[in-house]
Amino acid sequence: MTLNKPKLSRRAFLATSGALSFAVLGGGLVSVFRDPAEAQDLSRSEINAWVTISSNGRVAIRYASGEMGQGVSTSLPMVLAEELDADWSMVDAQQVDQGAPATYGNPLINNILYTAGSLSIAGYYDTMRRAGATARRVLIHSAAAEWQVPDGEVTSEPGVVVHGPSGHRMSFGEVVALPRLVTDVPAITDADLKPREQWRLIGSDVERLDIPEKTRGAITYSIDVRLPGMVYAAELLAPVEGETPTVTADREARAVPGVVDIIPLRNAVAVVAETWEAALAARELLTVEWSRTSPFRSTDSAAELKELAAAAADPACEAFAWETRGDARAALGSSDRVISAEYSTEYVYHAQMEPLAAVASVDEDGKGAEVWLGTQSQTVSIGIAAGVLQTTPDRIRFHAMQMGGGFGRRTFFARDLLPDALLLSKQLKRPVKLMWTREDDVKNGWFRPATAHRLEAALDGDGNVRAWRHRVVSASILQFSMPDNWLKANNRDFLVMEGTESTDYAIPHFLAEHAIADRRARVAAWRGIGWGPNMFARECFVDELAAAAKANPVSFRRRLLKNSERGMRVLDAVVAMSKFGTPPQGRAHGLSFAGYKDTRAAGVAEVSVDGQTGRVRVHRFWAAVDPGVAIHPKNLVGQVEGGIIFGLSGHLQERITIAAGEVQQSNYYDYEPLRIGDIPEIEVQIIESGAAPSGAGEIGVPMTGAAVANAIFALTGQRPRQIPFGQLQS
């Protein structure tokens, strides 16, 4: 028998103690380290490990996305552990704090550390599979060299390397403790990855790794961080964006026991104290005058909605094409039968459970800092910190904390809190924890923008949609939240316009366009980004077109979906699940087809309306979802359920109103999310297509609004055209 000659790298002979870290490099090459510290000593631009195996057999898998409750701290490690053939009971997950973009950055988001848009699985799926397969190959080649047998005769079982002919077995821990490790292994190709029929973990319902610690209250969020010598900061914030403070009286505030200092900042006055309670108490005693010169003083959300609607109806209003197929303008102009409708949406707040907090400890020289932050983007946050201190990103030691909800609010919130925490720490030469109360966050939130929609469609003699035009009028989220990206975007704001493409629908002449309105408030992505408002308008309009064509909502959508096998499957599935069109007495069903990026879904709502109060109640909601591949089905269902509840809450009752530039709401009593007693019975069915995994954290939102609105029309004859619906006229 001829033995494969082991190829040993310069690190093949290492001490037998410690752990083994694998770092996957460009081109699929691998380097191996005995412990994470050795890897950290090397340049981050060259190398970073994804997985560490200890001699006791524990497998630590790193994941680069931020954990905010959506379960990536389990689903991403599952992908790597599958290809590694790890024993799941021996797996630990570690979040990446910072690192080289080429290694840790999400390839779907410009190779930066950024968690949004249901892109964690889609972005890291291939990377994590190859990292796991490469690590497994190193273990197999190393064991083969130790046993002096061909590599091809060695395989693995969960947590164990096995040579079948001889019966030799070694645990992963025993392999990494060998004196010789074969690290110069062939690069992984697609053919080397496990076929689906061999998956043990992907597609299974393993328990989430983060739940036990969360259940015990052992997870540390940024709001929980405590450091030696740390002080607490509360801020009296400008009531209107862009206004500056003048402190006219602070003697009583400074007299509160424990107060360290009172410091005016760009748009706030910070009260710093030895305790949070002292900082809050002192803040209440401040007397501050605001500049009252902000142009946002004129913002009135009710007036803005009217202006947006007028712009949507004005054909002379400039708009920028987002999606074009055929010639919609000409087809609409030559049609004898054009249907039109208008819809609108109001501002909504993210309402994440964990209040915002940032902890910073600036170095003595003022050119470096250690930061603790629950953020949806480590890269953005590190860049902000480096900019504030006028230093380089390598001087920022960043700790990415788990988040108690994000929904888009924690994507760029570092622009709000982190600069002030850093400036306060630099001035006071002490670690500072800056926190915002719920009222601070509501009053100074970054909201999903108000939007207006005008839709026009031409029907041919057979009731088919020949042409379609969808005009969205809204401020640009991208322009405010990512100004550098906006400069290169050529007036294309994906955060507003995604979802208007309607590529699943067979419409020969199509135009979606964005009329960009002046910004009147801080605006940001909200769970589901543009898909929420855009699907609400589109799917309500589809029901209107079906009525005009004298077709039922199901058959009409089936015609539109004739070229979309995935779309047809979820539509048919949800119709069957819900027994669509046969609701109990006093209720009605409403249907909506929706997508979110590469995920397809359809939803049905069962609704009643109180004849006395006009209150809308959703009793049941069915959803069929095609995520391509369901990595963690139990978690995927939970995410869809959460998205449905989030969407229903926003569509039924959540709204932010602004008068004279000031937000009128302040806490959960006047900005009231859906309460537990109003949560409907939800049933979710996963319809796998075998397409690439595409995520499910946001797909629940886009399907909800129109499903409820269409049910309301079926029951009452009233078509809701603005969300939130509120109380209907009785």
Image (tube, grey):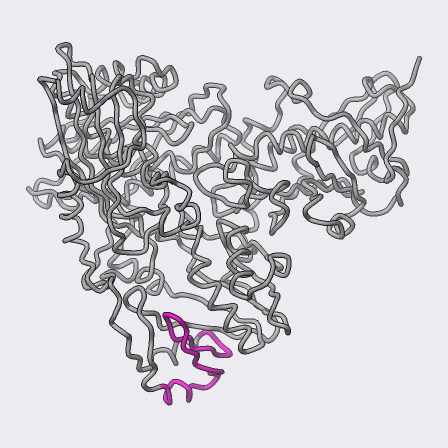
Give the x, y percent position of residue 618.
23, 37
**Left-right relation of 49 to 176:** left
Q: Measuring from the top left, give residue 273's x and y in whole percent.
A: 48, 79
**In this picture, residue 79 sits left or right of residue 146:** left
Looking at the image, is 374 positioned above or below residue 188?
A: below
The single residue placed furthest to the top in the displayed view is 462
The x and y percentages for residue 462 are 15, 10
In magenta, the rendered stretch is 250-276
Q: Is residue 24 visible?
A: yes
* Location of residue 678 by image quarter: top left
Please give the name of the residue rendered at 32% of the width and 26% of the height, measured from the top-left corner.
602
Left/right placement of residue 335 relative to residue 521 reads left
Tell whether position 269 is magenta: yes
Residue 175 coordinates in the image, percent (x, y): 83, 35
Q: Quadrant of residue 298?
A: bottom left
Instruction: Give the quarter of the figure containing the C terminus.
Output: top left
35, above or below 691, in the image: below
Residue 674 visible in the displayed image: no
**Quadrant of the snapshot with the N terminus:** top right
